Image (cartoon, rainbow, N blue to C red):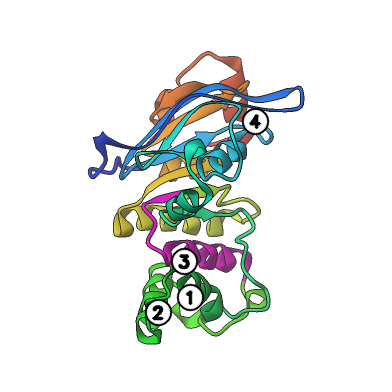
């Protein structure tokens, strides 16, 4: 079980969502979601596949528009921003995709350099190199700087994907199924890395997962998405201290000793 991060500031909300609704044709995915993320917090959103977890973080990042509701990120209402304002906000949000989203034709160094060249044109090569070395050291893969993505394991690609997200020093991290497709030992390494990123870079994070081992390892707070709404929230133990058969079935399916 994770020890609660003492740096969480509950007086400072970096994300505030009220009454969020989203449907695709006649299928209602989110049916009035309320959510808050505090400064320095790792918040886990649990739910089965297809329950709207990824839709939620895509709306937060401005990749999807809500049908109804208010989404405030770092003091700005996302769906009211101009395209330029949204682009500036996205630089403060790190999105770690499930498939790592690396460019196969680029080396690790080039993958990490790309966002710096694109978004921080004032940096010279020496400064870019220092930033790249720092994030590679943070994810434990300094030795992989000249490798191609095809030469990396699944866990290593996840780590490089997180490093590329960190390179712009985001205030918020959004992790989409960070342990999906990984073996238990590698999953544990990624869980430890998520906690290390929180400590080292003072990020506030939302972790989308259906992996209870991940939720228990990284979550300062856990919320459970069922039937388009958050039905349970609290610590890991508090969420699963219930007679709700839907929650018990989810726990038993994952089977944690």
Inter-mark Cα distance, 1 to 4: 37 Å
Report the residue marked by disc 2.
128
Checking the image for residue 51, the label placed there is 4
Region of the chain picked out in magenta, as a range: 153-173
Residue denoted by label 1: 117
Look at the numbered discs 3 and 1 and tell me whether their residues touch, using CB distance below 8 Å: no
User: Quick check: is 159 in the magenta stretch?
Assistant: yes
141 or 173: nearer the viewer: 173
Residue denoted by label 3:
163
Nearer-the-camera pick, 123 or 57: 123
Q: Quadrant of residue 106?
A: bottom right
Disc 1 packing (10 Å; few <14; some 14–19; many ≥20):
some
Instruction: Judge whether 247 appears above or below 45 on screen.
Output: above
Magenta stretch: residue 105 in it? no
Image quarter hosting the N terminus: top left
Q: Tell which circle, 1 or 4, labels the residue nearer the N-terminal end.
A: 4
Mark in front: 2 vs 3: 2
Mark in front: 3 vs 1? 1
Please give the name of the residue rendered at 48% of the width and 59% of the height, measured from the top-left corner. 189
Q: Quadrant of residue 76?
A: top left
Among the two numbered marks 3 and 4 on one chain, the one whose residue lies closer to the N terminus? 4
Predominant SS of the magenta segment: helix
Whether residues under marks 1 and 4 lie with C-beta atoms below 8 angstroms apart, the answer is no
Marks 1 and 2 in Cβ contact (< 8 Å):
yes
Task: State the separation of the CA atoms marked 3 and 1.
Answer: 15 Å
User: In the rendered view, would you say 134 is above or below 129?
Assistant: above
């Amino acid at each position: 079980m994770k020890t609660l991060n003492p740096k969480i500031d509950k007086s400072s909300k970096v994300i505030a969502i009220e009454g969020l609704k989203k449907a695709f044709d006649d299928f209602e995915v989110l049916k009035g979601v309320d959510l808050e993320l505090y400064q320095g917090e790792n918040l886990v959103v649990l739910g089965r596949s297809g329950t709207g977890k990824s839709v939620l973080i895509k709306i937060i990042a401005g990749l999807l528009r809500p049908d109804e509701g208010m989404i405030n990120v770092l003091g700005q209402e996302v769906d009211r921003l101009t395209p330029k304002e949204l682009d500036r906000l996205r630089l403060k949000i790190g999105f770690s995709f499930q498939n790592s989203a690396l460019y196969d034709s680029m080396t690790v160094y080039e993958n990490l350099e790309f966002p710096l060249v694109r978004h921080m044109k004032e940096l010279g090569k020496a400064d870019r190199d220092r930033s790249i070395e720092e994030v590679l050291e943070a994810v434990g893969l300094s030795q992989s700087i000249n490798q191609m993505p095809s030469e990396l394991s699944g866990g290593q690609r996840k780590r490089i994907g997180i490093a590329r997200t960190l390179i712009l020093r985001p205030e918020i991290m959004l992790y989409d199924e960070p342990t999906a497709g990984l073996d238990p030992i590698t999953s544990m390494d990624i869980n430890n890395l998520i906690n290390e990123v929180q400590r080292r870079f003072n990020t506030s994070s939302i972790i989308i997962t259906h992996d209870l081992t991940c939720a228990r390892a990284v979550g300062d707070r856990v919320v459970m998405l069922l039937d388009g709404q958050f039905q349970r929230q609290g610590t890991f133990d508090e969420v699963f201290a219930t007679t709700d058969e839907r929650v018990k079935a989810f726990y038993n399916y994952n089977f944690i000793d």
